[in-house]
Amino acid sequence: MAALMIQGCGSDVGKSVLVAGLCRLFANRGLTVRPFKPQNMSNNAAVTADGGEIGRAQALQAIACRTPAVVDMNPVLLKPQSDVGAQLVVRGKVAGTWKARAYQEGKAALLDTVLESYRRLQAQADLVIVEGAGSPAEINLRAGDIANMGFARAAGTPVVLVGDIDRGHVIAALVGAHEVLNPEDRAMIAGFMINKFRGDPALFADGRAEIVRRTGWPDLGMAPWLTAAARLPAEDAVVLERRPRPGSRQVRIVVPMLSRIANFDDFDPLRGEPEVELIFVPPGSPLPGDADLVVLPGTKATLADLAFFRAQGWDIDLAAHVRRGGRVLGVCGGFQMLGRSISDPEGLEGPPGRMEGLDLLDIETVLVGDKIMRPTEGRLAQSGAAFAGYEIHVGRTRGADLSRPFLVRADGAPEGAVSRDGLIAGAYVHGLFDRPEARAAILADLGASSAAFDQTERVDAALDDIASVLETSFDIGRLSAIAGLDRH
């Protein structure tokens, strides 16, 4: 079956968005397309139709293909829990916690698993579009590689290399990659593409010609800055650090940037609301004193991030916010932090231990048992507004405030908790702001009106917009030939 792999000259060069756009482009042409990423590293995870978890970038790419996400689309997922260790997820299920050095030494053993998943996708698709990780030019990581050239050569998948011109030095990045790759890896590259160009494309014609001259790789086109990508969920938290603080709006919603923040795309719908100012507060900065709502987000390491939260002085800021009558919402790990205590007796998210919580909800959490991964829908308990989201967490929570649930699932089961005064709430459900009804009800409690757009429809329209731009930016005929579509 036809296949194409998109690798980059570095992280955050736009590989995920380009793969999503190309998936939608070829799906719009009537092809059955599947996304694939051999190895991903991200704390933004999605629940799949077959009951596992994968990186949210691949879930977005599945949406672009108009197909349900399955674990084979991202068979190896690393979820960082510390600077030197990560939880390893293989085919959607937790397979232990690995130190970085040990994983680098043992990752080659996962290649057969990766190739099995890839072959299954190939069997059901006209075209598989593969996303690499980081850069193949990181030759210090080449031994045992399963994410870039190690996979490409094992699978016989042609590679297109992407350079990010917005960063500058794109000529050096592409020519440098050509220089450092070994001859066998270099031979896998069938061409290059430039991403994120701003201005008149003719101004970089000489630069593109120079890259061709120095590498011999075909020039497959140059994409402009894709403004529609801002409507897509971002995969890496580094994006949050670059987002500017917007001007004053009617309500101000504040999200502290935890060190292991997870699934922060929960808040993307709020960014599109005209009456909402959404602020991600970086470490070292106080929580704004005029916030209307503080949201504690999900995290991959709840105890460690609770300590991190206190180290920033945010616990003091949050207590002052509550004294002023401000509202607080906890999502997943943030919900756990709001309780009286959190215990991790088995060391599921780091060293075993117990920590006092923020004591804003009368609940206690113990991190035990299998990870819960499931889609969830229902209604907000107070307003009755419909929500649809998903759960992905470990931990069992008990306490008196659970008798006042924040949500009610479709089967009638209560979910989450609300304080006696109604100002503090939390739940395990991600995606609470996606549905316009639920988002409007939450904003109404803050005194704001909602634009009432559906986040799912917003993302789908953005994918179509990106596909349309890529159609005229890249040599799609040549990409199709490289992938082998002309043989089918």
Image (cartoon, helix red, strand yellow):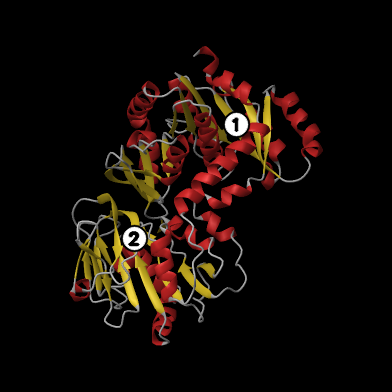
Identified by mark 1, the residue type is Leu
Which of marks 2 and 1 precedes in the sequence?
1
Q: Which mark is residue 190?
A: none
- Residue 122 seen: yes
Which quadrant holds the N terminus? top left
What element does badge 1 sit on?
A: strand
Q: Would you say 14 lies left or right of 37 here?
A: right
Q: Do residues under tags 1 and 2 come within 8 Å of each other at their CB atoms? A: no
Q: CA distance from mark 1 to mark 2?
A: 44 Å
Q: Quadrant of residue 303?
A: bottom left
| Residue 256 percent coordinates (x, y) | 46, 68
Q: Which residue is mark 2?
A: 386
Indicate whether 33 appears above or below 372. above
Give the crowd class for mark 2: few <14, some 14-19, many >=20 residues within 10 Å. Answer: many
Q: Quadrant of residue 14?
A: top right
Identified by mark 2, the residue type is Ala
| Residue 82 percent coordinates (x, y) | 39, 55
Q: Would you say 73 lies left or right of 340 here?
A: right
Q: Residue at x 38, y 63 (%)?
A: 438
Q: Which residue is mark 1?
A: 161
| Residue 406 percent coordinates (x, y) | 28, 69
Indicate whether 194 appears above or below 188. below
Q: Would you say 462 lies left or right of 163 here?
A: left
Q: Residue furthest bottom?
A: 323
